[in-house]
Image: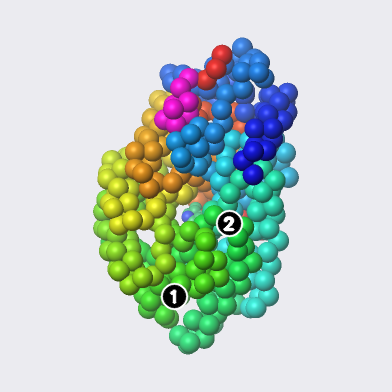
Amino acid sequence: MRRTRPRLIGALATALLATGVGAGPPAQANSAPAATTSAQTAPAPAKKQPTLAELARRQGRYFGSATDNPELTDTAYTALLGREFDMITPGNGMKWYATEPRQGVFDWTNGDEIVGLARAHHQRVRAHTLVWHSQLPDWLTGRDWTPDELRAVLKKHILAEVGHYRGKVYSWDVVNEAFNEDGSYRDTLWYRTLGPGYIADALRWAHQADPRAKLYLNDYNIDGVGAKSDAYYRLAKDLLARGVPLDGIGLQAHLALQYGYPATLEDNLRRFSGLGLDTALTEVDVRMQLPADAAKLATQAQWYRELTAACLAVRRCVGVTVWDYTDKYSWIPAVFPGEGAALPWDEQLRPKPAYAAIRQALGGGQPLS
Ligand code: G3I
């Protein structure tokens, strides 16, 4: 698979340079030496700089992006997505509402489209997500279930979905967002009806359906050490002691400039490694109050540099995924009015200072001129 990549990247890079995609001028004035300064002097294709994926691979890591089906008609967007990353997460296409819209009726259309695109670009897939309280179909949330009924529904869904993608995905976010901020279990359909044992059950069923997929628990606000990440630490330790198939903890890392950088991120990654688990930064974005300005973008770049370096510093941190790569398709403005500009590329697909900072952290140095 990897043997064909340089040729593919070369072809894509040539096409991108021809259209100017990914090589435009900086989004905002900034003090950081952005990747874009080189673009102003029109770099020659022969001097093509390594992609984030290539830089990450040299460090034994991947660098990924989420994507979503409606965006895939945007050819400039998909070209950059196919070029710069080596791990893809479907932002919505594999969630329950999309994959089992009616009970027992499965629809793999959106997930398959993204897996197909990833394969065409020789990228792997972090599959997301099997058990969550959000984006569930009405048939599931609109009635009461006995524990036996719901357990059967969950088992069938996991076996069907993981079975469908068996051998085609690198990992699964098996359970997403299971805890509250104080470390207590989140009161979800699953917890309410099945008790905390649903997590071990889900992991076992996923393992049964695809023994080679890496199985993760994934959450936000567990980037630093604290009550919520402590809950994952305790749970992971307990699951491993009981022989439950758990491979990793996903730290979503939805960060916001106004709340500060999670200074204990590296320590936190390291303690999960100490349990023998993989870790990954799975949904990274760094939002800010709009409008963006040079100072905010510089701070954002510094955070991207630091979180990338934190992952590199911890052996079992396997990679970093941004929650889509361009502000054009970020989920932030719809959910946090007045906030945004969270990703390393701006809405015109121009790299921001954060892009250069990530490159630097990955050992890429300054862009070629
Ligand atoms: O499917 C409907 C479409 O029919 C309708 O026209 C459109 C109008 O707004 O909405 C569409 O649904 C949207 C859906 O994404 C698919 O695009 C929902 O409104 C929107 O709320 C939903 O947002 C997703 C969000 O999860 C839901 O919580 C985001 O795209 C997705 O990026 C986000 O991802 C989550 C991770 O799965 C878990 N961690 C947090 C992260 C951010 O919220």
**Is 82 left, or right, of 198 in this rendering?**
right
Residue range corresponding to the magenta coloring: 358-366
Q: CA distance from mark 2 to mark 1?
A: 20 Å
In the picture of the structure, the residue carrying the numbered disc 2 is 169
Please identify the quarter of the rendering in which residue 75 is found: top right
Task: Inspect the magenta stretch and tell me whether residue 362 lies in it.
Answer: yes
| 134 up-or-down from 324: above or below | below
Please identify the residue farthest to the top as the structure is shown: 41
In the picture of the structure, the residue carrying the numbered disc 1 is 201
Viewer-side residue, 176 vs 334: 176
Q: Residue 191 in the image: state x and y as whole percent.
A: 40, 75
- Tell whether circle 1 marks a residue whose Cβ is less than 8 angstroms from ligand 1: no
Q: Residue at x 61, y 32 (%)?
A: 349
Q: Residue at x 49, y 81 (%)?
A: 151
Q: Residue 357 in the image: state x and y as whole percent.
A: 44, 28
In the image, what residue type sits under mark 1? Asp
In the image, what residue type sits under mark 2? Val
Determine whether the residue tagged by mark 2 lies in a helix, strand or loop: loop
Q: Residue at x 48, y 87 (%)?
A: 148
The quarter of the picture where the N terminus appears is top right
Determine whether the residue tagged by mark 1 lies in a helix, strand or loop: helix
Q: Residue at x 34, y 38 (%)?
A: 313
